[in-house]
Image: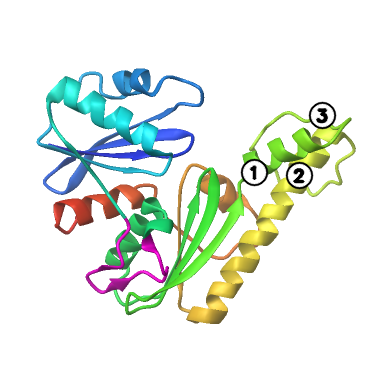
Amino acid sequence: MIITIDIGNSRVKLAQWQASVIVARSVQAYGDKNLSDVFDELFTGIKKPEKIFAVCVSGDENRKTLANWVERQWQLPVGFLKTEKRFGDIVNAYDDPSHHGADRWAGLIASHQLFPDAAVCVIGAGTAITFDLMDGDGGHLGGYILPSYVTMHQSLLGDTANINSDLSAKYIDNKKVPNNTNDAVNDGLHKLLQAGVRELCSSATSVLGSSVKIIITGGFAQTILSYPEVPEMHHQPDLVMQGLYVVMNKVQVK
């Protein structure tokens, strides 16, 4: 068995692999929790794997915490994915690839495998909402980053007086003009994100052509998919895990 782990800025995701197929998944939000305690929960009942691969975009401290936990419990090293200039046909557009998130890099690699020879726009809907454009030959063009719903909500309430709103990412398209502050904030932020997603997807189509495949992953993906008038998207919840597994294990996933 092989384990892949994705440590984001708010959640830790885990997948267990057998013969290049995911056989089990789990996820934990960590917030202010001690990350070692989160790993205790995530790994409960899991036998010692053959290998562990990880992508971590939340800082060196969390990377060290995972490496120390695995070494203490199983005496294994953790293979951490790093963004490189090239992987196979895929060429990263960044002058310094280390500045391109390893989770975004994994998403591009998995997308190229899922849709070979197709141009793609890969959306990572997490703590930030990222867009990466890649042509059908594997040429990465770069991308965009938007603040998430949660980030904008926290910023708005933190920088303004006399505005109170419950943080609720649930989107309801009731077509009514909000008549209270809570709904005014939440509906306004959702409409802003909806417009931003539509605009950047339109930009991707203009650059890559009308046959571009739009792929979305991440914890906020379902909310974006519920927005009206967004283009067709392919929802791939395991996208980062698949890319991580392909690069680190040097195999094709099924």
Q: Please say if the residues under marks 2 and 1 sit with CB atoms less than 8 Å apart.
A: no
Query: Mark 2 and mark 1: span between their CA atoms?
Result: 11 Å
Q: How many marks?
A: 3
Quadrant of res 235: bottom left
Q: Residues within 10 Å of mark 3 (few under 14, many from 20)?
A: few
Q: Is residue 210 visible?
A: no
On screen, residue 38 above or below 226: above
- Residue 187: which disc? 2
Mark closest to the chain's N terminus, 3 or 1: 1
On screen, residue 60 above or below 122: above
Residue located 32% across and 28% down the image? 65
User: Which residue matches tag 3?
Assistant: 164
- Report helix, strand or loop for mark 3: loop
Q: Amino acid at mark 1?
A: Tyr
Q: Is residue 17 shown left or right of residue 243?
A: left
Residue located 60% across and 67% down the image? 200
**Can you give x and y, in whole percent of width and height, for residue 194 in the image?**
67, 56
User: Which residue matches tag 1?
Assistant: 149
Residue located 12% across and 26% down the image? 75
- Report helix, strand or loop for mark 2: helix
**Can you give x and y, in whole percent of width and height, for residue 216 in the image?**
46, 56
Location of the C terminus (image quadrant): bottom left
Q: Look at the image and give the residue range highlighted in magenta.
A: 83-97
- Report helix, strand or loop for mark 1: helix
On screen, residue 116 above or below 238: below
Task: Looking at the picture, tell me which residue is in the foreground, 210 or 197.
Answer: 197
Q: Is residue 101 shown left or right of residue 166?
A: left
**Can you give x and y, in whole percent of width and height, for residue 204 in the image?**
54, 73
Q: Amino acid at mark 3?
A: Asn
